Amino acid sequence: MNANITWGGAGLVLALAGTAFVISEIQHGIEVGNPLPVAYGGAVVLATVIAVLLIVPSMRSSS
């Protein structure tokens, strides 16, 4: 199997799992009115979107 697909897939799984975890932190920050977890969560979501945009094209071109 191609290394781009193996490691890219693992990276996407970890990024999406981290985003799923951080969503609960964002919700908690909104509930208590603390902007720090919301800002941190927003940065994690943005990093996940950037990771997907970088990884998926390399996975598609190598298959």
Image: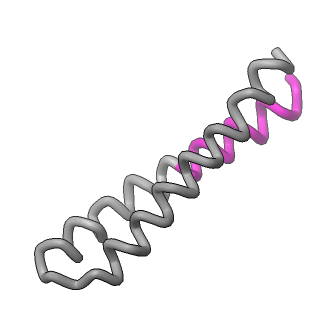
Which quadrant holds the C terminus?
Answer: top right
Q: Is residue 15 left or right of residue 23?
A: right
Q: Is residue 54 above or below residue 22?
A: above
Q: Is residue 26 left or right of residue 5?
A: left
Residue that protrudes farthest toward the top in the picture: 63
Residue stretch rendered in magenta on the structure = 1-15
Where is residue 61? Give x, y as percent: 82, 19
Residue 6 among those drawn in magenta:
yes
Where is residue 38? Give x, y as percent: 32, 72
Give the residue displayed 40% in from the left and 67% down from the top.
Answer: 41
Q: Is residue 25 left or right of residue 21?
A: left
Residue 45 among those drawn in magenta:
no
Residue 55 occupies quadrant: top right
Give the residue displayed 23% in from the left and 76% down from the top.
Answer: 29
Where is residue 28? Give x, y as percent: 20, 73
Give the residue displayed 72% in from the left and 40% down from the top.
Answer: 54
